[in-house]
Image: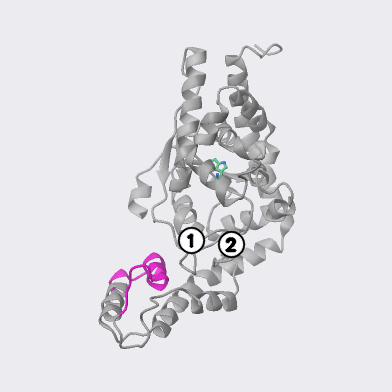
Amino acid sequence: MKNLTNTIQNQIILTGDRATGPLHLGHYVGSLQQRVELQKHNDQTILVADMQGLTDNATNPSKVSSNILNVVADYLAVGIEPTQTTICLQSQLPALSEITMYYSNLVTIARLERNPTVKAEIVSKGFQRSIPAGFLTYPISQAADITAFNASLVPVGDDQLPMIEQTNEIVRKINSLAGKKVLTECQPLLSKSSRLPSTDGKTKMSKTMGNTINLGSSPKQISAAIKSMYTDPMHLKVNDPGRVEGNVVFTYLDAFHPDASYVDKLKQHYRAGGLGDGETKRILEECLQEILKPIRQERSKLLSEPNYLLRILQQGSETARQKTERALNDIKNVFGLNLFKC
Ligand code: TRP
């Protein structure tokens, strides 16, 4: 992964997270490590998407507001450097909302309802009978986010590919309206690892389902999560042959253990029989405790200085505001609505 990411240079990168909960190990392997690499040779912005977080949490807004600084602390604790990456807050960038309004005229309700991610989320969030307008239209707002920064590359998980597709449709419509290239189409950069399963093995990790190991989890919480991890239900006695596929402990060892050939040997041993779940869990726990300890410590130090985190976010948002206002200006021009500016 490292080598591959190192070949990506001089791109304008925009990525973001909804601020609806602290970040977890799934984010760490899926996106955070990649961002730490990408920031070195690219112009990277990370958007804390608080407004998008409200699209399915408007009745419980503190779920968003109380997590903004947690997310910023998570970024810094894993090594995202505010001197190399612009970290900004969506609600502090009014140009994004204005751009969303202009784009809304270019997208039909039917197109939004066909977006596979939106479709799946309507069911998973129980919105079948009544969908908040802001939720249905969040792909438009995400297109505004991406194009306002003129992003060429958008690192995302595969569930976000339909958003990129919708963004590029809007870009083509704007360019065709303008009769020239005003906006650039973007490319997705898929996160390197397949999704990390939740500790119960049932779903993907989710900020909301309580089946995660967070970057800020305490040693006890980590230990408890590993003890309850899903393994092979048919592996009853130590000497029974066990299944590695679908065994969450091995999925995590693959994702986090630094020595892949050692993990391969463990797998062989487990398959043949004679390696107990207690032992595989002990090895995983040792490895995760070691990875998470410095991150947890840094994170809690940062959270004890909220003013520092606020300053990072404010400065990043100021930098971002200038970029997004330039894009808004270009888009208003396309519609002939810059009456007071030339
Ligand atoms: N939809 C993304 C998520 O669920 C968050 C997000 C908002 C985003 N705007 C973005 C991601 C722009 C990439 C680019 O986490």
State the quadrant of the C terminus. Answer: top right
Mark 2: which amino acid? Met
Q: Position of residue 221 (x, y in %)?
A: 58, 75
The image quarter containing residue 306 is bottom right
Is residue 12 in sight in this rendering?
Answer: no
Q: Nearer the viewer, residue 229 or 37?
A: 229
Residue 281 appears left or right of 268: right
Do labels 2 and 1 touch, CB within 8 Å?
A: yes
Determine which residue is flagged by label 1.
Answer: 203
Determine which residue is flagged by label 2.
Answer: 209
Boundaries of the magenta span: 242-261
Give the residue furthest to the front. Answer: 129
Q: Position of residue 225 (x, y in %)?
A: 53, 74
The image quarter containing residue 287 is bottom left
| Location of residue 100 with respect to 2 vertically, above or below | above
| Among numbered discs 2 and 1, the one appearing first in the sequence | 1
Mark 1 secondary-structure assignment: loop
Tell me if residue 56 is in the magenta stretch. no
Residue drawn at point x = 63 percent, y = 54 percent? 72
Residue 188 appears left or right of 58: left
CB of mark 2 near ligand 1 (< 8 Å):
no
Mark 2 residue crowding within 10 angstroms, few (<14) / some (14–19) / many (20+) = few
